[in-house]
Image: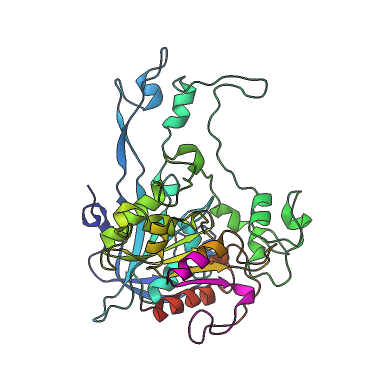
Amino acid sequence: MKGIKHAMMAAAALIALGLMSNIAAAQDYSAVNANGTLVLGGYGNFFIPGNLATCPTPPPPATNASVCAGTTNPGLHMINQMYVQFMKPVKEARKMHWPIAIVHGCCLSTKSWQTTPDGRMGWDEYFVRQKFDTYMIDQVGRARSGFDATVYNSLNTGITHCIPTATVQCPQSPNILIASDQFAWNVFRWGTAPCTTSPCSTNTTPHPGIRFPMQTVGVGTGSNLQFYNMVIPDLNNATLSGAPSPADPAGFYNTPAQMAELARELGGAILMGHSESSSFPTRAALQPASGCYPWTTAAACKVKAIVQLETGCFANLTPAEINTLAHIPILIEYGDFSAVPQPAAPCPTEIQQITAAGGDIKFAWLPALKPNSLYRRSPGPITGNEHMVMLDTNNLQIAQIIIDWLSSRGL
C-alpha cells in the first residue's frame, strides 16, 4: 500500500535533540563536532513500498528452502522497496521551502549526507537547519533498502543456467562493484596522477588545495581511514530489475521510479542526486508517478526542482522529455580537478535543448564560476572541491549555494 502515513515511523511531537552531531555516525564518537541544539518538528523513517516476488523453485536436489529460507513451496519475498529517513524543522506559519529528497551515489549510502568522516556537520543536518523538510534515501538495492538476493541463490541452485568456459567457472554470480582505494582516488579526483599502487595515501600526491579531508583516507601524520568505513558493496547492476540503467531517460529504473513516488506522496519535492545517481532526479521526473511527464500543469508535476551533483546529463532526450524538463528548474554542479573542460558531453547538448525550449538550467563548474551567473550575488570561482563535495571542508558553503539558487527560484 502506497502512502507515507501508513509506512512511516515518525515523531509526532516536537523533538529537541542536543546533537553532537549524529551519534550514530560511522566514525569515532570523540571526533564528532558539537553543532548545538537542533530543534525538530518531526523525525522518522519509512519505506516507499516495493513489490512481492515469487521465490523460484530450484531443480533437485535443491529445495525451495535453498532459495528462500523456511519455505517448502515457492514463497514470496519483497523487492524494490526504498528506505527513506527524514528530519523536519519546526513548523512555521509561512512555508519556507519545498521538501528536499537526496540520494547517494555509487558504493555509498545515506551516510554520505550525514556527519562527515572528520566529524563536521553534514548536509542532512544543514538543510533542516535552513528550514527544509529533509528526506535521505538509500538507493533500491543498497544499505537499508535491501536487495534481491535470488539472483545469487538461483545460480547456486542451478535455476540460472551457466555455461563453463576456459575462463568462467560455474556457478558464476553477478558482479558486485567493490570500490578500492584506487577506485576512490581516481574516480573522486584526489591525486595529481592516477593511483595504480595501493595504498594510494603513500603512493600518490593529493592535489594542492584539495578540500576533501584527506586525513580520513590515510594522508599525513595522525591520519585515519574513516572515509573508507562509508564505502559499501554496490550491487546495483547485479540485483536490480531494469539494470543496467535504461538508455531511455524515461525508461523504468527502480530508484528513480520510487523517488517519483516519494515526490508524489510528499505533494511535491526537490530531488538531488550525486554521481551514480546524478541522473536519478531527471529520470524520476520522467516516471509516471511524478505527474510531470508528459507535461500538463505545474500543479500536477511533483518534481519541483532538480539538482545534479557531478553531472547526470542526457544527449538523447525526446521532444516530449525536453518539454517536461524545460518546466523544472535544473542546477548541475561540478567540482575542480577535471581532466577536461566542463561542461563535458553530453551536458552541452541537454543544456542547449532545454534552454532553447525556454527552460531554466544552470551549470555550476565551481572553479570557473562567474559572479552573478547562478543568481543575483552568486559567488565567483571556488577551487579545491573534488567529487565528494558534500564531505569537503567547505561543504556548507556549497550547500548554501544550492539553497540560495533554490530560493532565487521561489523554491
Q: Residue 186 occupies which quadrant of the picture?
A: bottom right
The answer to whether 406 is drawn above or below residue 30 in the figure is below
Which percent across, then down, holds residue 6?
21, 53
Verify whether residue 363 appears in magenta.
yes
Which percent across, then down, holds residue 285?
37, 58
Span colored in magenta: 352-379
Q: Residue at x 36, y 58 (%)?
A: 85
179 and 229: which is toward the camera: 179
> In the figure, is residue 255 to the left or right of 29?
left
120 and 178: which is toward the camera: 178
Which percent across, then down, holds residue 330?
45, 68
Q: Residue 129 occupies which quadrant of the picture?
A: bottom left
> In the figure, is residue 116 to the left or right of 382?
left
The answer to whether 282 is drawn above or below residue 107 in the figure is below
Which percent across, then down, holds residue 335?
61, 68
374 and 78: which is toward the camera: 374
> In the figure, is residue 145 to the left or right of 73?
right
Q: Is residue 391 visible?
A: yes
228 and 169: which is toward the camera: 169
Q: Residue at x 56, y 36 (%)?
A: 175
Verify whether residue 132 appears in magenta.
no
Q: Is residue 45 visible?
A: no
Q: Residue 383 occupies which quadrant of the picture?
A: bottom right
Q: Residue at x 54, y 68 (%)?
A: 333
Instruction: State how many labels appear.
Output: 0
> In the figure, is residue 121 to the left or right of 1?
right
- Coloring applied to the structure: rainbow
